Amino acid sequence: MAIDITDTIKRLENRDITRRDLGKALAATGFTLATIPFWSRPVSAAGDQAVYFTWAGFDVPEAFPDYVAKHGATPDLPTYGSAEEAFTKLSTGFKVDVVMPCSSDVPRWRSAGLVQAIDTSRLSNWADVIPTLKSLEGTVVDGRNWFVPWEWGHTSVTYRTDLFDLAGKEESWGMLWDERYSGRLSILDAAEDAFWCSAIYGGVDVDNLTDEAIAKVFALMKQQRSLLRFRQSDSTSLVQALASGEVVAAMTWNDVAFTLNSEKVPVKFARTKEKNLSWVCGMVMAKDAQHSDRAYDLLDAVLAKASGEWLIESSSYGHSNLTSFAKFSDEDLAARGLARNAVEVINGGVFIKPQAQEITQKINRAWGELVAE
């Protein structure tokens, strides 16, 4: 893949693509975001700032403006393409201060000795965090918090209402197994979403993932494989494919449907009869954090109202700070697949729960084999 760096930088400045999209595209070529200069971002002296290991796309000043205002620069911002990649790098000694997994990852990361408990009394914005998000399963142990919730939302099917015929049936995950649209369907290129959404469709008890249950899920995924146009690793290419009609239904997060509707493309973010997939992602502090004080400044900054307003506006994901929602009308939130009450949205889907490390390893191993075939 050839990438025109000058053109790419212009597209980034114009917000035609996101840094998350670029990060994944570059990874396929062997480059990283660190190889490209971004003059609009204040640069820190080496070793001077907190090291924030996050998804490409969230490595921008708007995500933590209070930190930039206090320290005059962003944190150092290495990025990753999946939670499993982040886990592996930390396991092999990669030194960071703060990382951004999802709540279901926390017990595994804690058991592996990769993270430390967080003193929430040092976070001035903690009082504004939606109470339910403070005590998600596996994130509080012996009265200590191991996770700072940040974003939440759903994974579902975004489909072209003018091109995909429901034939009088309810919206369903089965839309992504519909043979009428072979070669015009897409799923996320991530086991974290693809496995769980397939499990929901297959009626698998996600609280009791036996070997037989896991095998059933992957049997469904193998049936689906020949129907897919591609597995998407960035939202930009998927938005384009849905807009052109190349793809008529795809597994997505909240943001894709909102983006397309804003561009007057007739799509809908389905409320599947089996229920959507719910998730909450956020921050943990690395066990060997070298910049503890600045790491706490970063955690407090991502919890701030300004960070939340940017997140809701730019990504259509919910934020953990309830005051962030005051800027948006109920109609606007509904259009983004959100509501002021996070519990209402999260409980409206099947929530990803922590799994034993052995089960996670089995899923990741089977996923690797599936995509390699």
Image (tube, grey):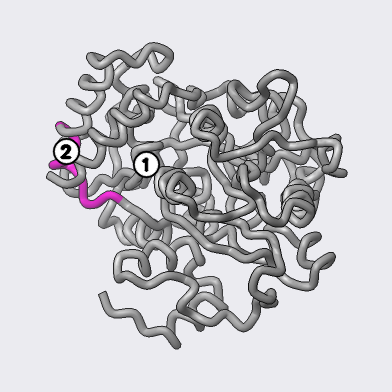
Left or right: 354, with 222 as reference point? right
Q: Secondary structure at mark 1?
A: strand
Quadrant housing the N terminus: bottom left
Closer to the camera, 14 or 363? 363
Residue 40 position within the rendered picture, expressed as x and y whole percent measured from the top left: 65, 80
State which region is magenta: 223-231
| Residue 189 position (above or below residue 211) | below
| Residue 14 position (above or below residue 159) | below
Quadrant housing the C terminus: top left
Residue located beneath label 2 in the image: 180
Residue located beneath label 1 in the image: 251
Closer to the camera, 356 or 366? 356
Mark 2 Cα shell of 10 Å, populated few (<14), some (14-19), many (≥20): few
| Residue 219 position (above or below residue 303) | above
- Residue at 22% over, 48% down: 184
Q: What is the spatial separation of the Cα atoms under label 2 and label 1, in whole angstroms?
A: 17 Å
In reply to whether residue 267 is colored magenta, the answer given is no
Query: Amino acid under label 2?
Result: Arg
Q: Which mark is residue 153?
A: none
Mark 2 or mark 1: name the one nearer the start of the chain. Answer: 2
